[in-house]
Amino acid sequence: MPQPIPAIDDVAVNLGERSYVVRVGQGLIARAGAEIAPLLKRPRVWVVTEATVAGLHLEPLRAGLSAADIAMEALILPPGESTKSWPHLERTVEWLLDQKVERGDIVVALGGGVIGDLVGFAAAILRRGVRFVQIPTSLLAQVDSSVGGKTGINTAQGKNLVGAFHQPSLVLADIDALDTLPGRDFLAGYGEVVKYGLLGDAAFFDWLDANGPALAAGDKALRQQAVRHSVRMKADIVERDETEQGDRALLNLGHTFGHALESATGYSDRLLHGEGVAIGCLLAFDLSARLGLCSQEAPARVADHLQRMGMKRALAEIPGDLPGRDALIALMAQDKKVQAGRMRFILARAIGDSFVTADVPRETLAALLDEALKAR
Ligand code: GLY
């Protein structure tokens, strides 16, 4: 018996003339041609991806495009964070120019956050801006980096310090692509999912607490629900504050600590971005409890959830040496949220109720980090 085709969820990102839809569901790579065709002025697209993703998804994408008579040229970059750099940006832009990509054409970013950010930035600067489609293949990219138009590269001075806001024209979040993710990468992406519940939706956190283990074990309907809800939450925030003048900073819950830990571990596989975010979220809740902003029960619930999901929760679970407390605070001070030299934190009054503040005494932060480092 033919199986019914699972429904696709559409999340609209309403940004005036920069509006677009994030489609979430199964089989979207296989039907990419039909999805992208309405955007095209000529039946051809240029796909930029990386080698690991190419091995898994490039030929299915080619077949999906060719089913709608769309031709495809592909540039395959090396996998890994170091691809998000000046040399690979130059290579991508020059390839697109050599391919004679025109202003009216569509460039496709096929991959995780590194590819989405790099290709989005290349599209932003090519001929002063061409349209692009995001096909995120990692959980992290589906729920966070492919939505909202932040694009960019890393430099010697830090992560994401060069870039542009450039919204995609369409996002195809194919839930089937998550099947190919190593378990550790899936759970790291889940760190960004749980962040949404923690920052603004206690009922979503409760839902994740109940359904997270089944979702991680592979239940596709639950995965689709979680991705759709996360994207909806992100879209709501981006619609209110596209260029991060205010509320969008809430999406950085856990990131001030997380970025410092990522930097301290050399952006290596000692700590994946989403793992740093999850540990950072717990530290943000611990800090909030120390400051008397939320109950002690809140960080205990967060810790319990991360543990039941099999995720890293504490500095002790990061392999290798970490710098001391002052060096970590210095790394935190590199954060893009710093204003007039003052660090700003995303703290919480409760699970689902976060806010931005610069009001964190250094001694409270130091005591928190001392204790976290002592437990190693
Ligand atoms: N990843 C945070 C943001 O898009 O604002």
Image: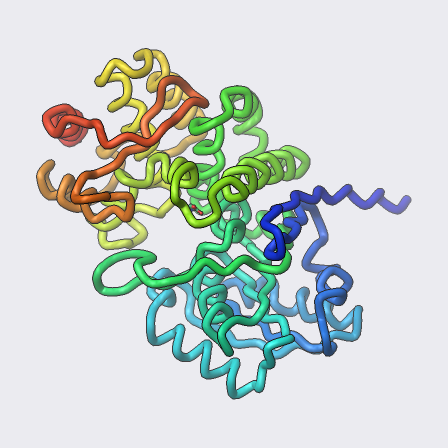
User: Which quarter of the rendered picture does the C terminus lie within?
Assistant: top left
In this rendered view, identify the residue nearer to me: 62 or 113: 113
Colouring rule applied to residues: rainbow
* Residue 217 seen in the current view: no
Image x and y of residue 184, in percent = 43, 44
User: Which quarter of the rendered picture does the N terminus lie within?
Assistant: top right
For image coordinates 53% across by 28% down, the residue present is 213
For image coordinates 32% across by 52% down, the residue present is 269
Q: Is residue 301 left or right of residue 65?
A: left
Question: In the figure, residue 172 lies in which quadrant?
Answer: bottom right
In this rendered view, identify the residue nearer to me: 49 or 89: 89
Image x and y of residue 72, in percent = 66, 76
In this rendered view, identify the residue nearer to me: 205 or 62: 205
For image coordinates 58% across by 65% down, the residue present is 132
* Residue 198 seen in the current view: yes
Q: Is residue 231 left or right of residue 184?
A: right
Question: In the figure, residue 260 lies in which quadrant?
Answer: top left
Residue at the extreme right: 1
Q: Is residue 315 left or right of residue 89?
A: left
For image coordinates 74% across by 44% down, the residue present is 8
Q: Is residue 1 left or right of residue 235?
A: right
Image x and y of residue 162, in percent = 33, 63
Question: In the figure, residue 317 lies in which quadrant?
Answer: top left
| Figure check: 241 above or below 229 | below
Image x and y of residue 142, in percent = 55, 48
